[in-house]
Amino acid sequence: MRSIVFIIAYLVFAGAQMQAAPDSIFMKANQLYQDGHYEESIELYESVLLGGFESAALYYNLGNACFRSNKLGKARLYYEKSLKLNPTDDDVQANLKFLEGLLADRFEVLPEIFYKKWINSAVASRSADKWAYISVVFFIVSIISIIVYLMLRQILWRKIGFYASIMTLLVSLASLTAAWKQHQDDVNPKTAVVTELSVNVKSAPRETGLGLFVLHEGAKVWLEDNTSGWQEIRLSDGRKGWLPEKSISPV
């Protein structure tokens, strides 16, 4: 019995130590950033990421450090990653908008069907975890509404339970769909950021392909097909082309 207690205590202690390690590195990186040692803080932030830990705050601070080091491509990458985890963060949105004004590339945005734009905006307003949480909450409310419908005798309460169960179940299913879509975007990113100073976009996935246009550090692209170290990309203005996969980083 004592050995079991010892093992459990050891696992709890080891888990606490593992959690404390990235937290202490994160705090040290924050202090380096405050002291103006941006390159050193970037190294520590990235070491936390390499350890398998991530958070909206970590990506945000790393984006700020990269911005201060004039690494605009990496700064945008980490701001975009921060927004994926916390889409409603006003500070990240403001910093990203300011950063976009400093980039070399400007693209027009093709008009989108209004309902498709509304749906995409609604889905992107929450992370996958938050949509899943909303789905669970409304599913529980739906179950309670069904119980009210089945157990109570009053006509009014039965009607309330019946319609409430339908509505909350629909909201639960819609939230679950949004959570699944966001999760798919996390597993298979649809966008990327150019992290090299400049890259020639080719007409075909090879060096001998015709040069179509040049993209610069910080440009955001949408991912299409890929083959043999080459990635087909699409811009917000509809233009497409191929570039080396090593020149971009998925969001």
Image (spheres, rainbow, N blue to C red):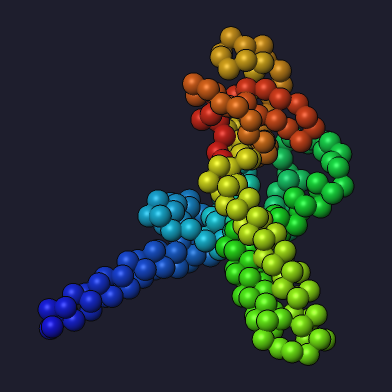
Is residue 83 visible in this depiction of the protein? no
Could you say which quadrant of the image residue 13 lies in?
bottom left
**Residue that extends furthest to the front in the rendered view of this protein:** 153
Q: Is residue 102 left or right of residue 115?
A: left
Q: Can you tell which quarter of the image residue 10 is in?
A: bottom left
Near-viewer residue (250 or 176): 176
Give percent across and percent down for residue 107: 79, 35
In front: 147, or 49?
Answer: 147
Q: Is residue 2 above or below residue 226?
A: below
Please provide percent x and percent y for residue 36.
53, 59
Is residue 127 placed above or below 237 in the rendered structure? Answer: below
Residue extending furthest toward the top: 208
Q: Residue at x 74, y 80 (%)?
A: 161
Instruction: Answer above or below: position of 20 versus 151.
Output: above
Residue 142 in which image quadrant: bottom right
Which quarter of the image is occupied by the C terminus? top right
Q: Quadrant of the N terminus?
A: bottom left
**Residue beneath the point at 80% across and 32% down:** 237
